Structure formats: structure tokens, C-alpha cells
Amino acid sequence: MISANNTFKRAGAVLLVGTILGGSPSTVLAQTAAPEQAPPANAPAPAAQPAQPATATLTTAPVQPSTIRSVAVRGNQRLEPETVRAYANLSPGLNYTPETVDQALKDLYATELFKDVQILGADTGNIVIQVQENPVINRIVLDGNKRIKEDKILPEIKLAPRQIFTASKVRADVERIVELYRRQGRFAARVEPKTVQLEQNRVDLVFEIYEGDKSKVRSINIIGNEQFSDGRLRKEMFTRQAGGLLGFFKSNDSYDPDRLAADQQKLRAFYLTEGYADFRVVSALAELTPDRRDFVITYVVEEGPRYRFGPIKAESLLRDLPPASIQRGLKIREGEWFDAKAVEDAVTDLNEVAGALGYATADINPQYNRDAEKKVMGITFQVGETPRQYVERIDVNGNTITRDKVIRREFRINEGDAFNAIKIRRSQDRIQSLGYFQEKLEIKDEEGSTPDRRVLSVDVEEKSSGELQLSGGYSSLERFILAFSIAERNFMGKGQELNAGISYSKYSKSVQLGFVEPYLFDKAIMLGGDIFRRDYNSFNYIGNQRNTTYSQVSTGLGLRTGFPVTEYLSFGTRYSLQQDKVTLDKNTFYSDLDGDGIRTCEPLLAGRYLCDEIGKRLTSLIGYSAVYDSTDGIRPTKGRRFSFSQDFAGLGGDVRYIRSRVDASQYLSFGGGFVFSALGQAGYIHPLQGSPGVGRDAIRLTDRFFGPQLRGFDIRGIGPRIRRVAYDVDGALDFESRRVSDSIGGRAFYMGRLEVEPPISAGLKSMGLRPSAFLDIGSLWNIRQPVLTDIPGTCVLRKADNTIEKTQTLLPGQSCATLPTGLPATDTRTFVLSQPGYKEFFLGNSAKPRLSIGIGVNWVSPFGPFRIDIAKALLKQEGDDTKFFSFNVGTNF
């Protein structure tokens, strides 16, 4: 039995023997063809012959091909013999040589169907192909993977059940799995493939995975920097060094090769903004520590000299954009430090100017004129000739629910109009502000059928426009507050809004239903309406016990309309009719003072300011609003909003006043992803002549402001209030356990808010998290002090039959037990308290600011929008109620 390699050896041996025997080429062939016969054991050794040159012998005696007599296949289980013979290209009648047999072996192994192959019988022509087939994979098992789930790994693996197991494919899949872990920064990950042998030549393929920890960036070293410290340059990079007090919260301290390249660009961009035009990164090397746990990154840089701006010039071939106009609009000046970002911004500004003039693809190129000796960089802004272009077509794609006209009516540019980049960007902001589509919506600009035509297309990805919201909060007054609302902001895809809401707590309840048509009769006229009922029960504390004071039930309806005046300015009017009913619990605050059987409100029990508010009143109110809004979406990052509104009550009804309110907000985006916002609000109510005021203030309790809502303070937690403190049995005011506090609102308020949203990692952003830090400031004040009451307690002396013998009023500091009875010493009867007294205090009526700071986070959770605020009141006035924590949660559908 010989293998293919043995065939080569046997052929060489035959040639050598033939040469030594000194035969002719015909002798060699004859001996090769004849069967081998062993010489007798006692035969003398052949006489030595003169040696012939080997090269000459091999050249004159080549091996002649033999003929295959038969081809048998052994060891095959799944494959048919004909299949194996076909792969080997061997069949009876064909000539073969050692090279033929060698090629057959290579062809069989190339199929990857066999674990081992031998070709036997080449010396006789009766070929036997002995094979051992590779097993079939029964299943693939992943073991040890926790950080990357199976649904992420299995699609990357090329092997699959019922495929042929081969070592090369297993090695390739191991590399693929390891690469997945490297992408997550786990360079210490290892994968060991193992097989479990099964019957019928099947195997289970098991990938045992050791994930290891994320490979962190242990240190970032910078060599060659002289003008800026390592720490300053590290702040410009995406990558951060591991460790530190906040190391647990870092997500960018793991090694990422892509991030390494981005960091080099960040370094270059930083130096270019600081005037170092020749800066370059010579090399960037990331070395894995011997334990394969961390990386050490080293940058070698050359800073070069610092440049200033030289002469700033402009050249233009556009008649509408002359050089003088270009230079007037530039914000860079000669003599300032060179800043590549300022040049880039200047090009962007020029493109916007050209876009507004109808040039969609303006040819604007800044030419740099470097003077290495003087260290100045002159800039020439060249504007090439470009044809004016027009909008050929507007395409809307991706909307399955929203109707085309709802999107198209937000475009500020129409088909056939001259191209205008500013109007296109404004159109993009308006479509985004609808709130029907995913963020980062973009209007694409493409070339049309001719060079002077442009096609605008917007690919929208619709999101849930319905909102199902469940809100909750914890109040030191109302305890848990729940609210449920449902709204559809794109009803039937027409852009209409339909909403309904219910809120409930122990002391407040409300229900509301509304509808808004933003484009009445396909015109830019908004029409909306609401009906509502609100039930509010005010309450106070006596000790630790809460008690309801007055109940206010408001029932009404409202209509409103609005229309745009300019692109950013709109005007709206409204009318509402509302009935308010204020009541007090008769069992608690009513008494029969005259003894005529008629119970009336008792000021000694409720306070005169509440007794005066009892009753029904009808409010007929007409108002208007002017709103300027240039913000860029539902979650603004830039732009401003300003509104002024006034409401006049007195067009019929029972009350008369003018209520004015102003709101303003500004949004700014800063480098690095910071978004800063500033908000201000103020309001004032002025009573009109003939207003049926009560008490000392002409504005009723139900018409006053009770805001603003400052985070860090409770609902109705700031502003004027009445505190009633009871006298104890000893005639002293009990400020701790026997007091009542009622918020009574104000006629004026102001509020300011500063808030900043910091940049966050891509991982947190993908989770829908948006943290923020804020500062709230505001106040509520400006009502006249109501009539206050100071009632001392009453002591009585009773006879044996329990009838009253004497009545005595307590003076402050006196006790019933110490009052002289005037009775004989043998009579031990004493005065006892029959009616506790109280004293009222007027608090909180001050314009002095209340101030709070805090942090909060918005989270687009699987359950819907979620907001948490934690705030600390830093400045407060006497009587204010604070609140440390609040939350809000909802969901979309």
C-alpha cells in the first residue's frame, strides 16, 4: 500500500536502479513495466559499474504515464462514489502520473468535505481513494456570552446547522466573534471552539467565550506640545482616560480605533482655531498592556508657528453678490489670530446669502495666502459664476398616515420659485415642529432635469402622534397627584388635534375636552375649542391634620382662532364663558349666630376673606395674543419665542378686569453640544371700574394668579396666604400644631428660568436621556391685606346642673385655670375653655424673589416620556411651602 508521496519515491527509485544497472532507456521502461522479482538470497552482488552523471540519466529516462485500471472509493458515508471520483478527476482508462495523483489530492481537500484523504494502488493502476468525511454540524452553541447576546453574534457566524464542519471556517468564525468584542472595546476576549461528537458523523459546535473586561484607556500621552498642556488637549478629544471620581459614569474611556482617528482630527481642528496653521500629528500609537486590559495612547505632534489673519479680500463673478457686499458680511478681521473655524463659518454664511439670492450651488472657495516669514495668513474669498436656479419639483416620501398637503403646506417655497436656502431651512424647521416625524429631518436638494432646476425632497419617518400620558407627583399638601390625558395631534392624518384629560387628587379634580383645526378650509387660519370642568378643594393644616377650606367649581367653554401675520409672527383671539362657584362646608364653617335657625358663614370659623368669596359668578372674557416664534422645533436648540396677551373680562358677566401676560424665551447652542435656554414670564391683573370686588381687594380669589410653578416649591406654594394660629389652653399661640395656612393668590407675578442641557454620550442619547440643570426664580404678590381676625379664647364656669354661670374672655397669656372665680374657697369649681381663640397673620405678599436650583432628566422610556426633577429652594419667604421631588411619566401610541 502506498500513498501519493510513495508513488513519487517509487518512480525515482526505479529510475536510479535502471541507471546503475547500466541499461538503456528501453531497459528502464521494461523494468518499470515488469513485475518486481526479488533476487535469490545467495546471489552474488552485481559488479560495480562506472557511475553515470545523474542529470543525464534523468533527462534520458522520463517516467511514462500509466493507465488507470479501476477507481474504488472507501470510507464515504454521505457522498456517492461517483461524486468522489468526479471531485478527484480520476476514472478508468485515463493515464496518470505522480503529478496527476497529487492534483487529485489537492482537488479533494479543496472541497472541504473531507477530514483526511489517501490515494492507494497507484503502482498497480487499481486506484483506491480512502476518505474520511468531515462531520455535519448538528447545532451551534454559544457559551459565556453575557455582554453580547446571541441575536447579535449568530448573524455574524457563517457556519450553520446542517453545514459541513471545517477547521478553516471555524477559525474564521472565531475571528468574527472576537472582532465583535473588539468593537465593544473588549480586546481581552477569547473564543475557544469545541466539538461534541454525535452519532452518524455529526457534531455540536460549541464556542466557549471568555468576554473579559472592556479595555480602558489607561493614559493618553502627548509628545511635542509646548503651547498647550496635555490636560488641555485631552479635553478636546472624544476619548477620555479611565479612572477619576466620575469614572463610573464615563462611556468614552474604552479604546476604539475609529475614535483614535477622530481624536487626531479634533486635535488638528483645535490647533487650527488657535492659529497654528502648520500643526500636524506626526504619529498616533495605541499599545495594549501585557495583561490585555488597558491601552496606552501616545501622540507625537508638531505645533508649528502661530499665524494671524492677513489681508481679507473678496472676488465675485456674481452680479447680485459684489465683493464689497461680501466683505461687509465677513466677521473675520485682519490682525486677529488665524481661525480655520471662522473661515469655515464665513463660507457657510456666504452660501446662505447666495442661497437666498437663488444660487443653490454657489462656487465659494477661500484661497489661503501664507506668508511664513511674517506669520500671517491672507484670505481671498472667491465666488465663481453660478447660474440662478429654480425649484422644479418637491417630493414628499415616507408618509403613510400624514396626508401630503399637511406636509406641503409647511413649505415656505413652492415649485417654480427661485431657489432660496433660507426658506428651505425654515420649511424644514416648520415640518419638524409638527411633531409627527422623527428628529433630524432633512430636506434634500438635488439637481433637476436641467442645470438651472433643483428638486427638493423630504423623506419623513412617521412616529406616534398620539399621546397617552399618566402623570404623577408627590406634594406635601396633596400627597399623590395623578393625571390621565389622551391626545391625537394628527387626527386622521389631517394635522388636526383632538385631546381629552382627567386629573385627580384628594383635593382637585378636572376633566377637559378640546379640538383644534390648524388650517380651516385649507387656509392658514386656526380654529379651536374646549369644554371643561374643574373642581378644586383648598385645604389647610391644623396640626398634622388636613382640613378642606373652600371648594371652587369652574365650568365653561372656550373658542379661539389665529392666523400668521408674517413668517414668524402670528396673532390670535379667543373667547371664553366660565361660571365659578365657591362654597364652604356648612357643618364646619357655618353657624346660627342670630338664633333664627338660619346658618350663615361664620368669620370666626372660616375667616372673613373666605366668607366674602362664597357664591356664583359668571365670567365673560375676550382676549388676544401676539406671538413671535423663530425656534427650530418641538425641542428647540436655537431661536427665540415671545408672546404678549391680554384678556378683558366684562363683556357681560359679573366680573371686570384686564389681565396682561408676557412670555419670552431664548435658546442657544454652544460648541460641544450644550443647549442653553432662558425663559421669563410676568403677569398683572388690573380691576376695572365697576368691578364687584369684595373685602379690600377688587379681584376675586378665583380670578387671581396662583403661579408661577417654581420647581423646588409646592403647588400654590408661594405668594400671599393667611395663616391662622390657635391659642392653646394656656392662652399662648401654638405655632407648631395649631395653625392653618391658606393660599389666596396674587395680582402680579414674575418668573425666570435658566436651564442648560449638557452633551451626552451616544449611548445615553440612544437611550433617550436628556439631563439638565436649572435655576428658577420668581414671586407672586400684590393684593391688599384682607381683614384679619384676632379672637381670644372663651372660658366658662358651669353650675352643678351644667348650666353656664359665668363667661370670661381670655387675654393673651392667660389660662382658664388661673382665672379668679370669685367663689368661696370651699367651692373648687374652675373656669374651663369652651371656645379656643385664634389669630390671623398675612404672609408672603412680597415681590422679593424665591429661588431654587436643581437637576432633572427627560427620558424617552419604553413607557413613554418620563421627567424627574430634584430641586432645592435657596430663597423663600415666610409661609412658602417647598417640594423636593416630582416626576411625570406618559406614553405614545
Image (spheres, rainbow, N blue to C red):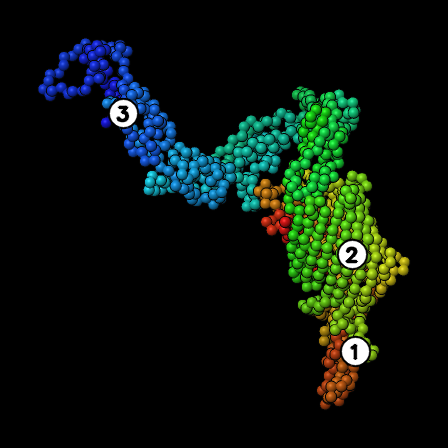
Give the residue at x 27% y 15%: 64
Spatial CA span between label 3 and label 2: 102 Å
**Nearer to the camera, 710 or 694:** 694
**Nearer to the camera, 364 or 371:** 364
Q: Earlier in the sequence, mark 2 or mark 1?
A: 2
Label 2 sits on what residue type? Leu
Q: Earlier in the sequence, mark 1 or mark 3?
A: 3
Mark 1 — residue? 809
Label 3 sits on what residue type? Ser
> Percent x, y for residue 137?
39, 39
> Percent x, y for residue 821?
76, 84
How many C-alpha atoms fall within 10 Å of the one at disc 3: few (<14), some, or many (≥20)? some
Camera-side mark, 1 or 3: 3
Q: Earlier in the sequence, mark 3 or mark 2?
A: 3
Res. 557 mark = 2
Mark 2: secondary structure: strand
Q: Left or right of 249: which side holds 723?
A: right
Spatial CA span between label 1 and label 3: 134 Å
Residue 265 visible here: yes
Q: How many marks?
A: 3
> Percent x, y for residue 217?
52, 38
Q: Left or right of 647: which side holds 769?
A: left
Q: Is residue 19 above or below residue 743?
A: above
Label 1 sits on what residue type? Thr
Give the residue at x 85% y 61%: 654
| Residue with the most extreme right position | 689
Spatial CA span between label 2 and label 1: 52 Å
| Quadrant assignment for the N terminus | top left
Residue 337 visible here: no
Mark 3 — residue? 70
Give the residue at x 72% y 34%: 424
Camera-side mark, 2 or 1: 2
